Image (tube, coloured by chain):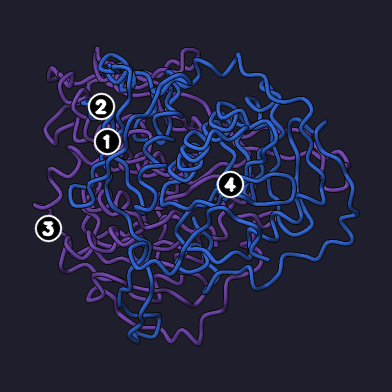
Chain colours: A blue, B purple
Amino acid sequence: MAGPYILKPDPSDPGLSSSVTGIDQNGDPIDTKVVTEKPLTLYLNRQEVVTMMTIGDHPDLLAVGYLKNQNMLADDDVITGIDHDEDLDVVVVRTERETDFEEKLKKKVRTSGCAQGTVFGDIMEGFESVSLSEGAQLKTSWLYELTKAINTTPSLYLETGAIHGCVLCEEDKPLVYMEDVGRHNAVDKIAGWMTLNDIPAHNKIFYTTGRLTSEMVIKTVMMDIPILISRSGFTAWGVELARQAGLTLIGRARGKRFMALAGTNRIVFDLDPGQVEDEPLKAKRKGSVPAE
Amino acid sequence: MAGPYILKPDPSDPGLSSSVTGIDQNGDPIDTKVVTEKPLTLYLNRQEVVTMMTIGDHPDLLAVGYLKNQNMLADDDVITGIDHDEDLDVVVVRTERETDFEEKLKKKVRTSGCAQGTVFGDIMEGFESVSLSEGAQLKTSWLYELTKAINTTPSLYLETGAIHGCVLCEEDKPLVYMEDVGRHNAVDKIAGWMTLNDIPAHNKIFYTTGRLTSEMVIKTVMMDIPILISRSGFTAWGVELARQAGLTLIGRARGKRFMALAGTNRIVFDLDPGQVEDEPLKAKRKGSVPAE
């Protein structure tokens, strides 16, 4: 049931969660596990770009994916090194070409939803010119296999809650499953993995535990992935942008149910939902508290 | 059961959600409601500060609360006007004193988790000097009353999902309930309301649907509120900061259960949890999909 993952969460990694003690509703002492959250400061060559709160796994993928998704790494940029200093909580990405985003960073603070989890000054630049794969399809049998496999994969979510997950999939196979305290970090880590491994996007499916907001739609489109699935709901602008870009947008995917609000032409109904078992109980987290 | 609210969500407001059509798992057409998400650009006097994605209600409260929570409005600043231009999606806050945050805004982009929903360059400035009310207490009977009242209050969450809520409470009474696509907007709207109405914080209780991350703890402490409750889980740094500040931190508050990981001395166990009914079914949203 855990799927043929290339990369997946390691909930047993002691660096990703810690035990804390407290009291419960009876005043009795309890032990619980909480997810790690620490700052990581990203440099592109000599320039400090951003400090992110992250669980701290895969700083290299997070760094490259962040730069890629912010349009700060061009397709022809050659990465000559990625150095992570664990003591300083710093990661440095070095490129062959000189980079200077001083002006861009200045602009970002004035036009973007900094501190609201939103950047769309520059990120919208390429949005309108993206043309997503028309040939891509999503069989509903794949969708059911994927959500079942993802929900039953051991994860920090199942262990500690309070975390977001994203999964890069192909047909009915989950390939790369990333988690992080910020859902954008999870997306960025997948983008970093795709960039560093030169993975084609046109035949991929993207799954997120998070809501289908404008930002999530923009990132998926900019990553050239034609299909986006979530167990959560939609926002109006997320739906509008998905329709504009021709992205297949599926939300509230739980058990046999789902709802498609854009790009429905890619969906192939090859399985009677009546044959799908409802969400298995073991998918529920210890204490059954959702991520957010 | 809706509580003696001073301000609460208006899920019937046509500006806050819209109907969209799509298809369900059987390929049948469906109508669903999705929450509005639109940009609002904030100016402080002549300076553009930020563009936020918001549902768009209470732009005045959001504007003032954002500035307050970013330490861009001092306690002795006099607000001389708040102008909202609905067509331009712009809100301008004017103050008696000249403001110039050009340097501060420049710094923010370099040291903060911009685009990750995190700002802690300047916001941490005052954190260590805050001393939260020692006399404040939280009776468990209040906690159960509050969560029951909040969960059964008609809201956009119950209507559309994909939204966060925050509630300012006193004893067992919810006072101000704000929702927004970004959880920080919901917090900021409450901070704006408190600022504009000169509301004391030391005897208040803050409830959020979102996770208890470092940012949420920092904002609550900076707002001088001694008690923070969530139905969601914790992050490690959130717990650490709450302990450092002496904030009472309660998570996973659902039905009769909760977990307190910091500031437990303020909790008064005045009600046997065995007498509390478990979370009522009517608290579940249409389609029962959580916010995130």
Instruction: Locate residue A143, reporting x and y percent.
Output: 75, 50
In the picture, the disc for residue B190 is none
Q: Quadrant of residue B81?
A: top left
Q: What element carries label 1?
A: strand
Q: Do the residues labelled 2 and 3 touch (CB within 8 Å)?
A: no
For residue A237, side relative to residue A136 (left or right): left
For residue B71, side relative to residue A149 (left or right): left
Of the pair B151 and A279, the residue shown nearer to us: A279
User: On the image, numbered disc 3 is attached to which residue?
Assistant: B131
Of the pair A19 and B142, the residue shown nearer to us: A19
In the picture, the disc for residue A208 is 4
In the picture, the disc for residue A92 is 1
**Residue shown at 35% from the left, 46% from the top:** A59
Protein chain holding label 1: A
Residue type (three-letter) at the residue carrying disc 2? Asn
Number of residues whose C-alpha sits closer than 10 Å to that of mark 3, classed few (under 14), some (14–19) or many (20 or more) = some
Protein chain holding label 3: B
Q: Distance between the residues labelled 3 and 4?
A: 39 Å
Of discs 3 and 4, which sits in the foreground? 4
Residue type (three-letter) at the residue carrying disc 3? Ser
> Residue at the left extreme?
B129
Instruction: Locate residue B89, reporting x and y percent.
Output: 46, 18
Asked if A184 appears above or below A278 in the picture, the reply is above
Instruction: Locate residue A81, reporting x and y percent.
Output: 31, 34
Q: Do the residues labelled 3 and 1 touch (CB within 8 Å)?
A: no
Q: Do the residues labelled 2 and 1 touch (CB within 8 Å)?
A: yes
User: On the image, numbered disc 2 is attached to which residue?
Assistant: A45
Q: How far apart are marks 2 and 1 (CA)?
A: 7 Å
For residue A123, side relative to residue A252 (left or right): left
Q: What element carries label 3?
A: loop
Which numbered disc, 2 or 4, marks the residue that appears first in the sequence?
2
Q: Do labels 1 and 4 share a chain?
A: yes
